[in-house]
Amino acid sequence: MTKLVRLIDQNRCMGCQACVSACAVENYFTPDAPWNVMVEYEVGTYPAVKRVYNTMNCMHCEQPSCKAACDAVGAKAISKNQFGVVLVDYDKCIGCGYCAAVCPYGVPQLNKSVAELYPGQGKSGAETIPYKDRHPTHRKKAKVVEKCTFCAHKLDRAVTDGKVDRIGKDQAYTPSCDLVCPVQARMFGDIDDPNSDVSMRIKATGAVQLKKQFGTGPQVYYALAEGAKS
Amino acid sequence: MELHRRSFLKGMGALSGVAASGVSFETVAQAAKAAQSAKGAAAVPVMDVRHVKSGCAICPNFCGIDATVVNGIVRTIYPDTARAEFYNHGICPKGASGMYNTYDPYRLKKPLKRTNPKKGRDEDPKWVEISWDEAFNEIVVRLGRIRAENPSKLVWQHGQGKYLIQEQFCEAFTKAFGTPNMVHRTTACEAARHVADELTWASAGILPDLKYTKFFLNCGANYFEGEQASRWLDWQATMSREQNAMKTVVVEPRLSACAGKADEWVPVRPGKDVVMLLAMAKVMIDANTIDEPFLVEFTNAPQLVDAAGIILKDKDGKTPLVWDTVTNSAKPYVTGVKPALKGNYTVDGKPMRTAFQVLADSVKEITPQYAEEVAGIPAATVTRLAQTFAKEARIGETIDIDGLKLRYRPSVLYTFRGLTAKEFGVQGWRTGLILNMLVGNIDAVGGLILGGAYARPQYFDVSVCEYPPKRADLAQSVFYPYSNHHIAQTPCLTVQDPKAWGLSYTPEMQIFYGSNRPMSIPNSGQQFDGLAKTFNVVIDVIMTESCWFADILLPDKTYLESWHYAPTRSTPDTGHNAIRQPMTNPYNLEWDAFGILWEISKRLDMRDRFAEECNKSWGLKEVTFKPGRDYTQREGVEIIWTDKTKKDFSVAIEQGFVGSKKNAKSKYLGGAEDKFKGPGKAKIKLYADQLIDTYYKVEGIAKKNDLTKIDLPKYKIAYSPLPNKDHAFPTPHREATGYPYYIVTHKRMHRNQSGFTVNNAILNQALGPDAATNYVQINVTAAAQLGVKNGDTVTIETRVGKINGTAQVVQGIRPDTIAVSYHYGQWSPGYSPAGRKGTAINQVLEYHPDLISGHNSFNDTKCKVYKA
Amino acid sequence: MKRLIAAVVLGLAMAALPAAAADEATKKPAAKPAASAKSLDPGTGAFHRVHTQKLKMSCDTCHASELKDVLFLRGAEVSASGPGPVDRAVCLGCHQAPAKPNWYGATK
């Protein structure tokens, strides 16, 4: 089996938000619905203070609460495949927001409108690429929920190109947020392979999932900085 | 550059469609295959996908990038993985979204001409669109007249533009034209650090040898948020901390990202770092934890200094004398002489001390307790830091690398603007250099690596102190004798009253290339007053505030639209040559700055002269610009690439760069060891005696010419050969009584070099509200006393004026200090609304440039803060 | 403490209501979804109706004046609106296995 996970090393992260920026570009950011957000907070009191940077994107939980809620209301717009990607089908989503209401991490975003990057100025750059030429996850719709897909369009490519083994290694098959980090604070790969870089580094850093008490089994691990919340 | 047609979307969505039911990879792959072979698959669009290796130009890190261009649109920008071993491993948020500096509907797209002769922030320029031909004519008519009358009346200014087509072309143009007035921006950034280096080791360009460093004392360098060499420093500092157990201590008033991730944050009181570092020097000297052999062999510490502070010279009047412990006499340091490092001596009946003794005596009163009082750092901390800095330097140890036995001093003090963006900025970094010298880490493994030691010996000499000044920026004149990096802010001041500065002409015309100068300068209102005095041509990408004061605006291409022979950053271990290449042109722009210069030169009938000057400024040897013909931008880049790299241009297009690695011998033995070590060589100036000589020269010229602009007592303080406690008391600290809070300013990742990113929709929106504006950071205790809560609007009042901002109440700042970042508060009506948020702190900062380097003082102002 | 007791009591009460709806929906996936785009509307949406009318929960049982939990992607969004954000830890009191509806799997 292949179970894709992400490691975020807070001891390395310097809070630059390159990952946030790259995600926005890669995934046709619309202002109402960011997929990747930097949470930043101080630990300690003056003068013994440190800073923690905790990027948040979809945790792609093993038992996703969003999917449970979506199934419960009958929309069945949220799926999870065998390598762990939790996806929202925009055509099935009814915009009820139950997924947003139950996610412990505040991940799903109800996209109120597909607003232009430069309001009133027409489409710019990638906005001009027609929907027919985009991956389904990039065909943004108003009043549906969207969220981080682990760059499913790239994982799709890996499968169709027969390059699943290059996920987390090649730029074409690796989520963009994990490609740009100046200090290599992010890593992506197969946790079911004990010899994968991500597996070994999760082990080496003692990385943990956030909010384990919710029991959703996140597929994103954090190497926690001193004093960091989990 | 890889060009291919790829069935990018074939089978696209197969996974996401099928995956909904939770199936295996194999099933998905089969489904995808089926989708590809199914009837109608040909209807799935086939797209052009190109991968282009190029370089980022948004800030002076010049990262290597790998762009994906889909159907002519730059879809993504990733770091070039091949560049990692030479410079950047990743890219920053600006670089990753850099295409939205290009895909910006607010850009300048056509030449514009001002029709309202009045210039002001509230004056509508009443632009009219004109053709390129008309624009060139307007410019050339004026330039032709100025060139015939007095070419000096043209002032060329560039900021970020320097890093696009590169300064060499600007220099060639101004030289061909005949004006001395080419002015770049370094005094708005880190010039004082370079000048301190030049006065000390006769060149500039330092980097810490972090790969081997064990103790990194960072005095306000902010590589996690944005500055030169950041994309190497951030990675190496992170890796060394993890893999080499390097400890990092950050000394600065605000908990920067660097401080927030350091092993220890030392929140020094603004401007007082000099006292803290001198107290550390005292601790080290008292404990004799110093590298005596280094100080004797590499520096001028043993040279004898008389009671007036002048270094004792031999009969030739040039060669410095030391106290020879073999013969007990004053001698030049030649073979056989063993100089004394310390002590008082009598030579020809006159009392003498070694330069080192002068330093030791000068810090006698600067105790850790005194540092606590002045700098607000506990005496015990100052003592501990001094002890740790010295201990971790492992004085006397060596290490074997590549078969060489090398000095091993893995303890280093580094700064960028922290010690330098101040009224006494040169003295600030001189203090840091002296601490590094005390432990002997210069060009040692793990220490401070010099870039090109003793490359410019003239900086060891007394300054020319030119008067009357030739240049409108007063660089290297009697007013700013060692302003070796131009003075960004002065042309807009001298133009307001040229005679007061002894300028023999009145600048008439300014060309700004990629520069929004006034916004980057303290007391920016003064700058705009200057802009209103001249005919201004601005070449830029977006409608900056400088554009608002322009007479003619010329739209430039961005770094994704043009060819550049690109500047690069080297590291202590690597270097590389790079290009940038065009990959899109959404607004069908015709000209870039190179083309504009070429066309203007042609119309001024100085094209061949320009070509000749290009050859000189670029130092082209074999492949050169030839007279009698025009060059496209690409042809120009190809010439430089071929001459510099000796590689075919196809390599540039395919790979974007060629890299090189330094060996241990050139890295550690090619600099200080070669130029300064031992008898008969020049010496690193622990004691900057040329400053004393220069002071007396300034005094003479000022008195002779009755120069009211020169305040001699201030020059005397600034021109001390050794840093002292006076350098911790800049003008506002002494004079602005009743203004209780210190202001510190800083760069931020998201808008650093804001002229190019101010409209970027990704940065302004996707990074969240905190990235789209700036805040007034106030300590929780201070905020409670002020009755200020997070999000409140507060007023900052200085002796210059008042400005409002949004309070951000934090633990991570000194209670007596507020911090506001640059890059925000832009007001040009030509920007997108999202670009005009926050506080332009430069508007209310006091203007007290460093009198040695001309560098601006960004961290000396004091203020009142209250709820608006 | 007051809030905790309320959550426990309401948790018991909830075991029957929405779970039945959920089960029904699961059995008939093609049926009209049990929620709509208006479900989260304050006061009128089904989500609030269940919690406030059927379960008689007061607003401050769930909503706080500020979000204490910073590890929340939409942190900026929720703190800016309405009666204050909901810390999902409150939901955990009821919606965790084995109670139904179970959004939060098995506690590990």
Image (cartoon, coloured by chain):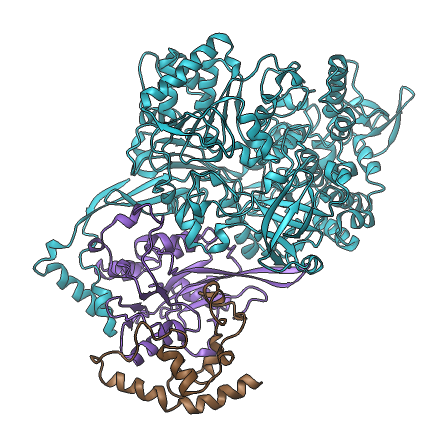
Left or right side of A68 for B7: left
Residue B29 rendering spot, x and y as whole percentages? 20, 65
Identify the image quadrant of residue A78.
bottom left
Residue at the right extreme? B349
- Residue ID at (17%, 66%): B30
State the purple chain. Answer: A
Question: For this rendering, which residue is in front, B174 or B803?
Answer: B803
Q: Is residue C45 visible?
A: yes
Q: Is residue B605 above or below residue B820?
A: above
| Count of number-bearing discs | 0
Q: Quadrant of the N terminus of chain B?
A: top left
Color of chain B here?
A: cyan
Identify the image quadrant of residue B468.
top right
- Residue ID at (40%, 57%): A178
Residue B676 rendering spot, x and y as whole percentages? 66, 29
- Residue ID at (65%, 30%): B201
Q: Is residue B343 above or below residue A90?
A: above
- Residue ID at (57%, 33%): B451
Question: For this rendering, which residue is in front, B220 or B362?
Answer: B220
Q: Is residue A162 above or below residue B629?
A: below
Left or right side of B287 for B519: left
Q: Is residue B153 above or below residue A205?
A: above
Question: For this rendering, which residue is in front, C8 or B236?
Answer: C8
Color of chain C here?
A: brown
